[in-house]
Every structure is written in structure tokens, then in C-alpha cells.
Image: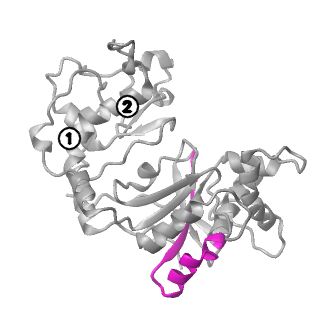
């Protein structure tokens, strides 16, 4: 069976189509709130939410860009932005456009406008506060109707998506998903402790049980990535190292190390090329091993037995912005090709 991430429902596809017009250059999020553009007042689809605090990139939905470009009279909105690029789907905290223009970062970063408030607070000088403010101004008016529907009806995600806490992985961006689509679990190393394994943390097992038994997700995906610091730590760990919380957690990755060293198991591989080094080999092997741990969980085993649940492995190469899906029978991760835009 060739693994694949299940397609979104027709309703989700319709909502997404409404909110993804051609991109326009983003504008700084300063200034007083302005009403949404008349053509953007319908029920907007679910745009990718912002990544967690400290994640480095805050995802912006293209509809947000549309709302900004539709208000040329805004005195706070310049007609052009230095270094503006086609990557208008994202509004990074750390300027990532520098790689295109070669200009120093200082030329790209707009001056922070400090707003002085009673009591000495300066929320405008905080990246997270500015990001939240930009969401409230640009995106909230567009998604409020959709979020209100989700609030009334409750969440019904189709997938449990388990991945690493690495800040370079923005789950909503690499899966083109939005609110209500994915039930996401993130931890260091995208590890799934095996049932019965000595652990002082039941959060992963609890999330699996809730997603599978309560939310009735139809698939579970384990997503690893290139350059994973947890895998590097596993390879360099010393047996006598002090038992810090991180070291104790990484013990759940030991079976992945053992699998990679075993002559009884075929090594996980990428179609088209060999793994770049031992770290990448372990990153791939770890995804396969965590799927094995997942199958041992009672709730997962029960749903797999009745055919109502599928498991998938995914690998994301950060430097190439390229996703791979695991073909388990072949033991290989296959590159995912770009989909042609079928919209009129």
C-alpha cells in the first residue's frame, strides 16, 4: 500500500478555493484596525494558523494578503515593500527574504513602531504581540465565520498528525491544512513511546487514545524531518551522560537506533538517492520505528483490525522544502510531486 495523506473533503476544498486568490505582496501590520474588504466578507475558509510561539515563521493565509491589498488608501500601507517576494503566504518573524535579494537583513526589517501604553507596557515591541495583532486585524475578520461554525459543531479532524517540535516545521503550511483539519501532537524527535515503556509522560499516549477513540480520526501520520536535533543527540549520546529530562525522553528513540544497526531489518531509504549521512538515515528509520510503536497501542490496533484506520509515514526535507511519503511494502520514502492547480 502506498501511503498517502487522505484528501480533504469537498466542503473543505470549496472553502479553501474561496480563500486562495493570487498572492499579493504583504504589508506591515501596523496601524488601527480597518474593516475587511467588501469582496472578502463571505464565509472564509480555514487559513493555516500561526505556528507556536518561537516557531520562526508565522503563516499567513493568501486571503489575508488579499484583504491588505484591497485597502490602498491605508496610510500605514506602503505601495511597495523592500525585498518583497512571491513568498507572500508567510509573514516571518525572522526575515527569510534575504536569501533572494542578498541585501542585509536590516534593509528588510521594517522599523518596529512602539506604542506606549499606561503602565509602561510596550506590546508593539514584542514579536508575538505584533503577530497576534496582525492576525486580529487581517485574518480574524475572514475566518471568524468558519471558526464560529467549528465552535458550534466541534472539531472533527480526519487525521492525527504526529511530528517534531522543530520550529522549521509549520504543519499547516506543509500540509495546506487549516482549523479543524489536523489533530496535531508535537514533541522532540516525533517519538511515540511504546505501550508499557517506562515514562513519566503519558501525553502522547493520551493524545493517541483521544484522537483514535473519541475523535475517530481515519488516519495517523508520523512525520520526521531532515537535520533533526533529537536524532543527532541520539547518535552522539554517551551511556554515562547525566539523566536530564531530555536524555530520559530520548530513550524512547533507542529502538530506532537499534533498528538502524540491525542486519535483520532492511534500511529505510529514499527513492532516487541514498541518505546523505547517518543522521538522515536515522531520521528515516525513526519514522518507520514509531509506526511500529503506534501499532502496539490498543486503540490503534483495534481500529487497524476493523479497517477503519490507516497509518502513514512522512519525511520532510527542510532544506529542499520537499515532502516524502512512506511506501511501507517497498520500505522507501517516495517524493511527493507538486499538484497541478485545477481551479478555473
Which label belongs to residue 180? Answer: none
Image coords of residue 198 (percent x, y): 74, 63
Helix, strand or loop status at disc 1:
helix
In the rendered view, would you say 96 is above or below 73?
below
- Residue farthest to the bottom, as pictured: 306
Residue 202: quadrant of the picture = bottom right
Image coords of residue 261 (percent x, y): 83, 65
Q: How crowded is mark 2: few (under 14 residues within 10 Å), some or many (20 or more)?
A: many
- Residue farthest to the right, as pictured: 240
In the rendered view, would you say 93 is above or below 122?
below
Q: How crowded is mark 1: few (under 14 residues within 10 Å), some or many (20 or more)?
A: many
Badge 2 is on which residue? 131
Q: Residue at x 58, y 60 (%)?
A: 204
Find out whether the residues at labels 2 and 1 contact each other: C-beta distance under 8 Å.
no
Which label belongs to residue 141? Answer: 1
- Residue farthest to the left, as pictured: 38
Residue 327: quadrant of the picture = bottom right
The magenta segment is 292-318
Tell me which numbered mark, 2 or 1, is placed earlier along the sequence.
2
Helix, strand or loop status at disc 2:
helix
For the N terminus, the quadrant is: bottom right
Image coords of residue 26 (percent x, y): 30, 31
Residue 217 is at least partly visible in this image: no
Residue 244 is at least partly visible in this image: yes
Which sits in the foreground, 29 or 199? 199
- Residue farthest to the front, as pictured: 119
Q: Residue at x 61, y 76 (%)?
A: 295
Image coords of residue 250 (percent x, y): 73, 53
**Residue 95 covered by magenta stretch:** no
Q: Which residue is drawn at 89% across and 51% down?
A: 239
Amino acid at each position: 500500500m502506498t501511503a498517502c495523506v487522505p484528501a480533504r473533503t469537498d466542503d473543505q476544498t470549496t472553502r479553501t478555493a474561496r480563500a486562495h486568490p493570487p498572492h499579493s505582496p504583504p504589508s506591515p501590520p501596523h496601524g488601527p484596525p480597518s474593516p475587511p474588504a467588501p469582496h472578502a466578507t463571505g464565509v472564509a475558509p480555514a487559513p493555516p494558523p500561526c505556528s507556536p510561539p518561537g516557531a520562526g515563521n508565522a503563516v499567513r493565509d493568501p486571503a489575508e494578503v488579499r484583504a491588505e491589498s484591497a485597502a490602498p488608501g491605508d496610510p500605514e500601507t506602503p505601495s511597495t515593500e523592500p525585498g518583497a517576494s512571491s513568498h507572500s503566504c508567510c509573514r516571518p518573524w525572522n526575515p527569510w527574504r534575504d536569501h533572494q535579494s542578498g541585501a542585509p537583513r536590516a534593509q528588510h526589517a521594517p522599523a518596529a513602531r512602539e506604542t506606549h501604553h499606561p503602565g509602561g507596557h510596550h506590546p508593539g515591541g514584542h514579536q508575538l504581540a505584533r503577530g497576534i495583532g496582525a492576525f486580529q486585524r487581517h485574518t480574524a475578520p475572514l475566518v471568524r465565520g468558519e471558526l464560529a461554525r467549528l465552535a458550534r459543531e466541534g472539531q472533527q479532524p480526519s487525521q492525527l498528525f504526529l511530528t517534531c517540535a522543530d520550529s522549521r516545521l509549520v504543519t499547516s503550511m506543509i500540509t495546506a491544512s487549516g482549523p479543524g483539519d489536523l489533530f496535531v501532537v508535537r514533541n522532540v524527535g516525533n517519538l511515540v513511546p511504546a505501550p508499557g515503556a517506562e515514562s513519566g509522560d503519558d501525553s502522547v499516549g493520551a493524545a493517541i487514545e483521544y484522537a483514535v477513540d473519541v475523535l475517530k480520526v481515519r488516519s495517523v501520520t508520523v512525520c520526521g524531518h531532515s537535520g533533526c536535533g533529537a536524532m543527532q543527540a541520539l547518535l552522539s549520546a554517551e551511556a554515562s551522560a547525566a539523566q536530564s529530562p531530555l536524555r530520559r525522553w530520548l530513550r524512547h528513540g533507542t529502538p530506532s537506533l537499534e533498528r538502524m544497526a540491525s542486519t535483520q531489518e532492511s534500511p529505510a531509504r529514499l527513492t532516487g538517492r541514498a541518505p546523505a549521512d547517518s543522521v538522515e538515515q536515522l531520521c528515516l528509520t525513526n519514522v518507520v520505528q514509531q509506526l511500529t510503536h503506534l501499532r502496539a497501542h490498543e486503540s490503534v490496533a483495534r481500529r487497524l483490525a476493523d479497517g477503519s484506520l490507516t497509518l502513514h509515514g512522512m519525511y520532510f526535507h527542510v532544506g529542499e522544502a520537499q515532502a516524502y511519503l512512506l511506501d511501507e511494502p517497498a520500505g522507501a520514502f517516495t517524493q511527493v510531486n507538486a499538484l497541478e492547480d485545477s481551479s478555473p
